Image (cartoon, rainbow, N blue to C red):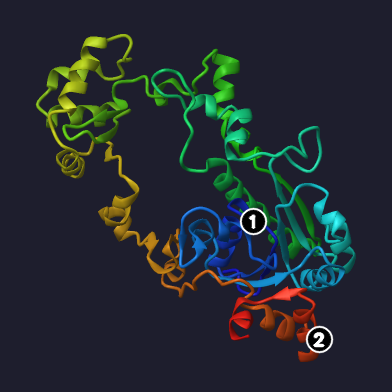
């Protein structure tokens, strides 16, 4: 789908790499520009074959060139590379790329139709632009974290990086829109993407309910206050999700479990009928998760098991959809049949494609490439291993 589109990726850790991986999954050529020692996520956290799992999870189907961007020669190599690109993605703090001579305005002079996306926590301007920040901070100031509280009212710390992933989705959305615009107008685009932006966007429904309805926790029917829309503990200490919002689904559930007297209680708030809530809670604890899961396939009542990460790949629906591939140890979500059957390349080693990029793409001579290696302007793990 994106064959012929070249993306130069200066980003690191999660948001940018996840975004460019999604573009690579759709056929774009993604060239990662790494520091000489490699992208930071290679070296942190749990590792496999001495490479961080965070890096392995977000960098399949990409090429890698290692460049010392602190050197003038390295900056020149990077600029020449950017001139061949359709899209540039970077996630440095604001002003860093300008200091390196690789900012949008500089690149635009060399390639007018460049699409350039800068990913940051709080955007490229404003009083918070230079503040250090991470996923939890964006969730906090967007209002999302206040919606994710435990039973004691304490905000939880999500183990899924919602801001980073939503930001990545917005990045790919903006880039694809910019590609369409360029095809129509022959003009490039600068995208200033704050990771806080998409979080504020998904709070729109909640904000309207607060502004016009005085409600702090979003849509009342969907915030867990209703007995028919909640998570319940099972006999074996697991949890099942019941979302029987519509009367027909609730009726199906009640009839299937032999509790027709519950049908009239559809839409009951937990606080308004504590006794009934206690009854249904105890009832769910009479069966195991497997039993309730089997029930959910037999009875049309909007019920689903709450799966742990080690159970996802064996769940029938996810297996049928072929959403998880063991190749590159990651999920490959696509609704396109050809995309699902395409070959998936493993994440590259540091500078794996340095020679290919310098010689085939930039036309550098063998002597010039060797000179760059000798000066440690570029790097390749494969070359180091041979030496």
Report x, y in % for residue 114: 79, 63
**Element type at mark 2:** helix
Residue 363 shows up from this direction:
no
Q: Pick the residue in front: 108 or 355.
A: 355
Count of marks placed on residues: 2
- Relative depth, front residue between 123 and 301: 123
Height in image: 233 above or below 182? Answer: above
> Which of the 4 image quarters holds residue 109?
bottom right
The one of 48 and 340 positioned closer to us in this rendering: 48
Quadrant in the picture for the C terminus: bottom right
Image check: 49 left or right of 23?
left
In this picture, is 169 found above or below 201?
below
Of the residues tagged 1 and 2, which is closer to the observer? Answer: 2
From the viewer's perspective, is 348 left or right of 115? left
Residue wearing tag 2? 368
Q: Is residue 301 visible?
A: yes
In the picture of the structure, the residue carrying the numbered disc 1 is 12
Q: Where residue 302 appears, x then y in whole percent?
A: 28, 36
Residue at 21% across / 14% down in the picture?
A: 276
Q: Earlier in the sequence, mark 1 or mark 2?
A: 1
Q: Residue at x 79, y 47 (%)?
A: 94
The residue at the point 64 percent across, 52 percent down is 171
Of helix, strand and loop, which one carries label 1? loop
Q: Residues within 10 Å of mark 2 (few under 14, many from 20)?
A: few
Density class for disc 1 (Cα within 10 Å; few <14, some 14-19, many ≥20) is: many
Q: Quadrant of residue 353?
A: bottom right
The Cα–Cα distance between marks 1 and 2, rounded to whole angstroms, is 28 Å
């Amino acid at each position: 789908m994106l064959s012929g589109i070249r993306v130069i990726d200066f980003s690191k850790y999660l948001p940018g790499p996840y975004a460019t991986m999604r573009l690579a999954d759709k056929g774009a050529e993604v060239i990662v520009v790494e520091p000489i020692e490699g992208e930071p996520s290679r070296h942190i956290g749990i590792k496999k074959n001495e490479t961080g799992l965070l890096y392995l999870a977000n960098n399949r189907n990409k090429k890698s060139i290692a460049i010392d961007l602190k050197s003038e020669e390295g900056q020149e190599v990077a600029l020449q590379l950017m001139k061949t690109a359709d899209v540039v993605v970077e996630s440095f703090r604001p002003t860093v790329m300008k200091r390196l001579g690789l900012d949008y305005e500089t690149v635009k002079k060399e390639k007018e139709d460049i699409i350039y996306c800068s990913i940051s926590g709080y955007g490229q301007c404003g009083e918070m632009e230079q503040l250090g920040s991470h996923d939890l901070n964006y969730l906090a100031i967007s209002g999302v974290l206040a919606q994710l509280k435990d039973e004691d009212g304490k905000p939880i710390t999500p183990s899924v990086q919602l801001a980073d992933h939503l930001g990545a989705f917005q990045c790919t959305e903006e880039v694809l829109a910019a590609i369409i615009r360029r095809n129509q107008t022959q003009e490039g685009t600068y995208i200033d993407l704050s990771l806080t932006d998409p979080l504020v966007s998904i709070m729109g429904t909640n904000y309207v309910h607060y502004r016009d309805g005085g409600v702090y926790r979003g849509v009342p029917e969907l915030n867990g206050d209703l007995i028919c829309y909640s998570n319940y503990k099972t006999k074996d200490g697991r949890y099942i999700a019941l979302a029987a919002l519509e009367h027909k689904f609730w009726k199906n559930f009640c009839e299937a479990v032999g509790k027709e007297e519950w049908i009239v209680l559809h839409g009951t708030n937990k606080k308004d009928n504590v006794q009934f809530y206690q009854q249904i809670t105890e009832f769910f604890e009479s069966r195991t998760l497997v039993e309730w899961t089997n029930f959910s396939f037999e009875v049309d009542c909007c019920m689903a098991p709450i799966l742990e990460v080690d159970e996802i790949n064996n769940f029938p629906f996810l297996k049928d959809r072929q959403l998880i591939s063991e190749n590159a140890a990651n999920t490959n979500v696509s609704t396109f049949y050809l995309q699902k059957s395409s070959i998936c390349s493993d994440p590259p080693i540091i500078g794996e494609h340095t020679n290919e990029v310098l010689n085939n793409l930039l036309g550098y001579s063998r002597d010039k490439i060797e000179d760059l290696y000798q000066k440690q302007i570029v790097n390749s793990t494969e070359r180091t291993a041979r030496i």
